Amino acid sequence: MKKQLLSLISLCLAVFITMTISSCQPDEDSGLSKETNLNWRTNPNSFIYPPSAHPFGKSYEEWGEEFWKISYAVDCEEAFAGGLYDLSDKVVTYSAVVGDSEVDLTISKNDALFLPLASIVNDYPCPDPEFEPAEGQSLEDFLQEGAIPLIEPIENLTFSFDGVAVENLEDYLFMSDLFYFTGNPELAECYDPCITGEPQPGVHHGYIVMLKKMNPGQHTIVMHGEIPMYEYTWDMTLNITVE
């Protein structure tokens, strides 16, 4: 396997953010009716853009590409400290090292929130001389094929907002097409040994969600995940202030 699973997901397992009826604003870009936005009691996922949506003109896979371009541009200290990043003038993202911890976060009521729940990039080239496509296999197919077993071991992935759990997370499992990014070469020493510091191809795979704009207030998010093959479990709480 090109990379150890735990090091791969450490950066990209972001905190899980959801919201209730009181925290969801009507949004002309949502593609959903106000009635759907308010129907959180019968549809706990109504505050999340559906998997087929193109919020602000991009698909989930395309927003994932933007996330990884920004995430790979940081240095080692920033990567493992976690932080809030702008993906556009309307979308922010939060990325953090997964673990048993509690985090305070402040976001604007004017921003949607993109979150990779458990996501990896399978990139090329790498130091391993055997990390090459088979004869006749495209690079995209090779990288997509290799990304699948890096996410499969994750089990019991959950997140909730003020006690309301999001359902059917399997609907938010995405695989991207081949895209190009330029990573900070420092990350080759602390996170991904395949980073070259030059434009290079990759695919991203994993669970990601886009949350609609939230009304001001205080909220508590709890997330949980397990990787039984590594005997690894994590629990994380995020305290959100929306201004």
Image (tube, rainbow, N blue to C red):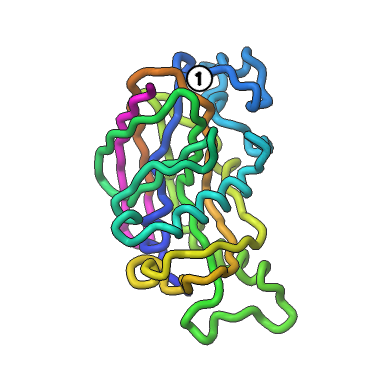
Residue 241 lies in the magenta stretch: yes
Secondary element at image label 1: loop
Residue ID at (66%, 17%): 33
Q: Which residue is mark 1?
A: 24
Q: Is residue 211 above or below residue 215?
A: below
Give x and y (percent) for residue 194: 47, 73
Neighbour tally class for label 1: few under 14, some 14-19, many 20 plus, Cα within 10 Å: many
Residue ID at (41%, 50%): 13
Residue 84 lies in the magenta stretch: no
Q: Is residue 96 above or below residue 152?
A: above
Q: Which residue occupies the extreme bottom position in the image? A: 129
Residue ID at (58%, 45%): 63
Give x and y (percent) for residue 78: 32, 54
The magenta segment: 226-243
Which secondary structure class fits the magenta region best? strand
Task: Specify whether 216 is left or right of 30.
Answer: left
